[in-house]
Amino acid sequence: MIVDDLESAAGWLKRIGYYRFSRYAYPFRKSHVQSDPVTGIRKVIISEDFQAGTTFQQVVNLYLFDKNLRALYLDAIEVIEVGLRVEIALLLGARNPFAHLDPNQFDAKFSFVPSPVDSRYAKWSWKLADKFRDSNEDFVKHFKAKYQGDLPIWMSIELWDFGMMSMLLDGMKTVDKARISAQFGLIRTNILPSWTRNLNVVRNICAHHGRLWNRSLVTVLPKLPQPGEVTVFDHLVADRGAQARAYTPAALLQYLQRVIYPVNDWSERLKTLMATFPRSGGVNAAQAGFPKNWEHLPLWQ
């Protein structure tokens, strides 16, 4: 690797650490394909050497790009998190201010399997109780000073994190998930919960300053509409590679924002940022799953 300014390089390594820096340097290493002499299976071998011409500044530029990308995703995730929490509160709260504390309001597999005390709902309730007990939010202090008992759902949602919101959405009865899903033009009720699981993982990556741009998300692949159901996703249905990379959560965020916050400039800001991608060597935006000419697809208009 070419290091033109040793003092600047030392400053960067002191600021962000060698290990974090090395994650962004990794794509600049040389590689070759090698066949196993016994099985014949071909695999990519990554060398310890960098591609010719790789500079320290190129790696820094990729790190800074990813930092800005994470901030942009977090901005959209906040919109989705708040919007979906409100939708859940409106639906359940119309029945009972404390519907979220009634396991019978949710799917039996969520509330009573393997048992009422060991169910996912029980774990969710314990986490909410902990948050309520430990919260220093002014509205919680005011409530505790004036009332006794639990927060009604329209206040309780302010204590939920993205993971709690996603878990409760997944545990709702089919009819309730259908009502919320329909607002987003989604026919099948298992789609939206899978999206929030995917976005929750992305949210955690971003919040903990992890590498995002070429991160594999294969363990939380979101379910997509069937071809023709939601046509703006048709380009993704057959692209398994893109589904497991950063492009797909961007597509989910863009689509959901169209309903929750239709007057926004997030897609334009993403296009502007992606136009600054620091292409160099074998590093390119396609490694983040962004298809060629993605910005001209109907989803992004």
Image (cartoon, helix red, strand yellow):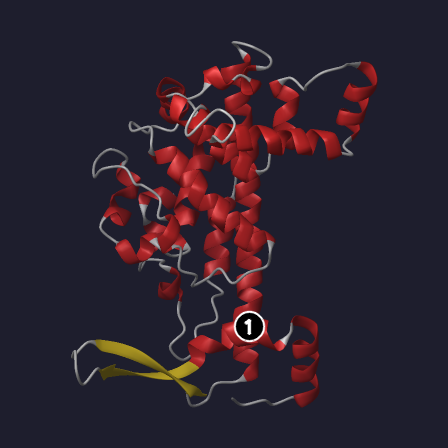
What is the secondary structure assignment of the residue under circle 1?
A: helix
Above or below, 54 against 284 in this view is below
Above or below, 63 against 229 in this view is below
Q: Position of residue 127 (x, y in %)?
A: 61, 34
Q: Nearer the viewer, residue 146 or 64?
A: 146
> Residue 44, located in which quarter of the rendered image?
bottom left
| Mark 1 Cα-neighbour bin, 10 Å: few <14, some 14–19, many ≥20 | some
Q: Position of residue 51 (x, y in %)?
A: 41, 87
Residue in the image at 43% along x and 73% along y: 279
Above or below, 48 against 257 in this view is below
Identify the amino acid type marked 1: Asn
Look at the image and tell me whether residue 254 can be seen. Answer: no
Q: Position of residue 239 (x, y in %)?
A: 25, 54
Residue holding disc 1: 61
Residue in the image at 54% along x and 33% along y: 123
Q: Nearer the viewer, residue 51 or 18?
A: 18
Left or right: residue 33 versus residue 67 is: left
Residue in the image at 37% along x and 65% along y: 287
> Residue 285, located in which quarter of the rendered image?
bottom left
Left or right: residue 102 versus residue 301 is: right
Left or right: residue 236 versus residue 82 is: left
Q: Position of residue 147 (x, y in %)?
A: 78, 14
Residue in the image at 46% along x and 60% along y: 274
Which of the image's four quarters has the C terminus?
top left
